[in-house]
Image (tube, rainbow, N blue to C red):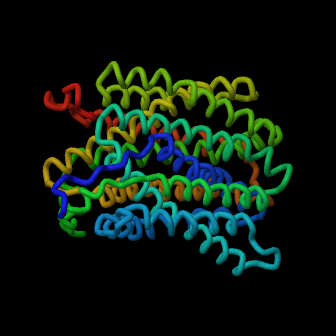
Amino acid sequence: MKSNQAPLIRKTHAFRYAMGTLGGSLPYNMFTTFMAFYYVDMLGLDIRIYSLALLFYALFDAIDSPIYGYFSDRTRTRFGRRKPWLMVVSVLFGISFIAFFSPPPFLENNGFVAYFFILMILVETSMSAIQVNYNSLLPDLFRDKKERANANSIRMGWMLIATIIGVALAPVITDAIGFPNTALIFGIFSICVWMFVITGVHENKDYQDYEHPKFFQSIKEIASEKKFWLIAGVTCFYNVAQSLMLAGIPFFVKYTLNLDAGSTTIMLGIVLVTAIISLVGWATAIKRFTLVPVWRTALVILTLAFIPLYFAETLTLSIVGGIFIGIGTGGVMSTNDIVIAGLLDEDKAKYGKRREGMYQSIVGLAARLNGLFRSAAFFLVFVLFAFESGDVPGPNPGGASRFLLVVVPIVMMLLSVVISMFLKIDKAEKREDSPV
């Protein structure tokens, strides 16, 4: 005789789910921070080719990311919707990441350029698929506001730890054992972490009973929401600023401060450690105040924090600027994903559909279109400063590094702040149980 009782939903531990951020962020932060320095400055890839590669992938990502979200939402297995995807793409990501930093020494000219293009696309597209599925699990696994905020806070903690290792300590590690060996260690570690996370995630099967979202109808409905465009715009320009800041620091330390890799580690470490420490204060602010104003305040602080770096001529002054950047970074990291999760709840309430994958992929697409702006920034480095590569750095490499590290990020963050001002908070959204 069959029981009419609903099946017991196994809870996923927030700590275990959050470790996925460690598995993804550790190698990916090394990838985004040092891919330009490794290929352009160390291996001599022309910066114009590098900027073209960023442009090409940004356009490619306009296709792959929504498709991943669409098929993920429509996936139905006894394991859930997201786990099968994560099982496959996390392995692809780890392998392609290792290969990216290990180009065969016999490659030259067009073969070298083709290798760079192909491996960069494999790393980026597999990370797109990971982010779509992993981020979509947050509102599914943790439906209570406090549980969701707790899980997200742990994720941000793991992200910052991963960034300290993958960004701040990477110069010292790679200086000791080389980029290929560092990538091998990080890539294998990433795969192992993802297997641990995936086996401990228990998706709620009731979400699989919702109507299959239709591709073009979903895009139309999501794109018709003003709030979607606002959060997507803020996320995009914030990501441009952050990625250029991280990528620009190695160039800044080498060409402006004239210091070694150890100083790069110190400067990056200050930014990231400060961000970790600030998480406690930002978490308190989120609990005591309405989320969106806290989110907007963090964006303003981060914007202003870049200004001191423009005038920095010594490591000490650079560290001061890095402290303020860390405070602002911690605030945006603490709030941005929760704002997006709130929009997902609103989308479900309005349309009666669970399509976290589609929503996350389209928001992620807008964020990852930062490649267009990063491509333009690197191309402008060539146009304005005649910086071609580490072999041909041009007459003013110090000015080029300031442009990447400070000028473009300030412009991007100003755009984020302005756009965030248009995200209005209705009275209904100010309830205690409202995510935004």
Looking at the rendering, which quadrant does residue 222 occupy? bottom left
Q: Residue at x 82, y 79 (%)?
A: 106
Q: Residue at x 43, y 38 (%)?
A: 152
Q: Quadrant of the N terminus?
A: bottom left
- Observer able to see residue 307: no
- 216 above or below 140? below
Say which of 108 and 290 sits in front.
290
Looking at the rendering, which quadrant does residue 427 occupy? top left
Say which of 84 and 110 sits in front.
84
Q: Position of residue 277 (x, y in %)?
A: 57, 25
Q: Position of residue 38 (x, y in %)?
A: 73, 58
**Side of 121 where 389 appears, left or right:** right
Q: Position of residue 109 (x, y in %)?
A: 74, 78
Residue at the front extreme of this rendering? 1
Say which of 358 and 385 sits in front.
358
Say which of 313 and 434 sits in front.
434
Q: How many marks?
A: 0
Q: Position of residue 349 (x, y in %)?
A: 15, 47
Q: Quadrant of the C terminus?
A: top left
**Side of 402 where 155 appears, left or right:** left
Q: Residue at x 49, y 36 (%)?
A: 154
- Observer able to see residue 363: yes
- 57 above or below 198? below
